[in-house]
Image (cartoon, rainbow, N blue to C red):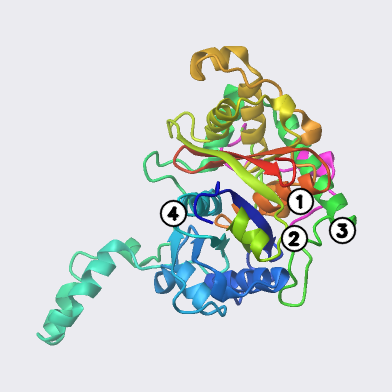
Amino acid sequence: MSGAVRKAVLVDGCRIPFNLSGTVYQKDLGVELAQKSLKGLMTKTAMDPALVDYVLYGTVIQEPKTSNIAREASINSGFPSNVPGHTVTQACISANQCFTTGAEKILSGQADVVVAGGCETFSDVPIRFSRPVRQRLIKAPKAMKKGAAGLLGLTKGLKMKDLAPEAPAIANYTTGEVMGHSADRLSARFGVSRADQDAFSLRSHHNAAAATEAGLYEDEIVRTNGITSENNIKGGSTMEKLQSLKPAFIKPHGTVTAGNASALTDGASAMLMMNEARALELGYTPKSILRSWAYVACDPFEDLLLGPTYAIAKVLKEMNLSIADIGVIEIHEAFAGQVLSNLVAMESKKFADDHLDGFHIGELPMDKINTLGGSLSLGHPFGATGGRLVTTASNRMVRGEGKYALIAACADGGIGHACILERYGDN
């Protein structure tokens, strides 16, 4: 294979059913969800784990006992102990980063076979003592040597509020603002109404329900805990139901509600990537080729969720493509308002002139966007969503929806990602 042009291809991908936190997977650890996706991928592709060169796996809310969840999950899923792996944390695009990092390993010749993916559980998050209590517990062994007086001394200065447990923070560290507030402000800035957001959310649920009914996810979901169903999809939802919900973040006049925001979800995904020559040598027909990718950073105070617009401009420009060339579009739906605000920004010639060096993306056709549902309906396990986006986009192309697929996602901290896949066989 030396001297041959190397191409990073997706052989196949899968996910365990995404389900609301506190329901189906309430007894599973995050590492156990990861194992289910990795075992599912190996079974689905009939891949020998011993042939894998590297494992990249993402997660956001980390369990300290399994901080390198890529290693713990793979070695407990039947991968040989000599297959290395590391964990990626990049908020909602963690699995996307695993996918593109895997491509970098393949293109640089450091690996021929990579498994990438991610998981998240909100059913078992690490809840810890407050910092004042933690500091005293660290000093406890030394204090115990002084007897009762030493232990009593540790309590000096403690307040009642210090005894309350701390759940993982949902507010951004730098801005102190939760993402829902950012989505609400962004929607107001770009003129996206509450009705617009509810209608987009309704579309997501109806598309997901129709896709599930038609069996379009059967090739992606691996049976887990005896089921393949996903319980966040609300095919029977109506505008009346959505509009009856109260604002969740900016009260009483905000536009983001529980109905047009993605729900806390448990799940895991996995993708099998290879150098093209290695895939063909092993008898696989790849589904897609990763052609271009970009990561961008925006002002987290004002543009926290606008990353997709900046990233899409970069990959289209790099590939010398226009939106007219794209047949499949998969955009992560953190919030309906976030997606719609990005669509407005991309369509705006003024935004292009002011922020994209004049590169006008244009209008994204709604009939190409998230036609099988998205994170609003399917759910959003932070570390796993990227794997779903890549696998779904590739399968849509395989079914004949176009030569190129565009994937985009926002992430906390003002990070954005986009990539372009090409249907295998069209190159």
Q: Going 17% across and 80% down the picture, which residue do you hit? A: 151
For the residues bearing labels 4 and 2, Cβ distance under 8 angstroms: no
Query: Do residues under tags 3 and 4 come within 8 Å of each other at their CB atoms?
Result: no
Dot 4 or dot 2, earlier in sequence: 4
The overriding secondary structure of the stretch rendered in magenta is: loop
Report the mark closest to the observer, 4 or 1.
Answer: 1
Does residue 54 appear anywhere in the picture?
Answer: yes
Q: Which residues are magenta?
A: 232-253
Label 1, on which residue? 395
Q: Are marks 3 and 2 in contact (CB under 8 Å)?
A: no
Q: Indicate the position of residue 13 as horizontal and vertical percent values.
A: 67, 59
Gap between marks 3 and 4 measured at Cα? 38 Å
Q: Position of residue 119 (x, y in %)?
A: 57, 62
* Labels 3 and 2: the sequence-earlier one: 3
Would you call the spot at circle 2 few (<14 residues within 10 Å), some (14-19), or many (20 or more)? many
Secondary structure state at the residue bearing disc 2: loop
Is 377 a magenta residue?
no
Question: Nearest the camera: 293 or 246?
Answer: 293
Type of amino acid under label 3: Gly
Q: Is residue 29 left or right of residue 164?
A: right
Mark 3, residue position: 215
Nearer to us: label 3 or label 4? 3
Q: Are the residues flagged by discs 3 and 1 in contact, CB closer than 8 Å?
A: no
Q: Which residue is mark 4?
A: 169
Q: Which mark is residue 220?
A: 2
Q: Is residue 2 left or right of residue 133?
A: right
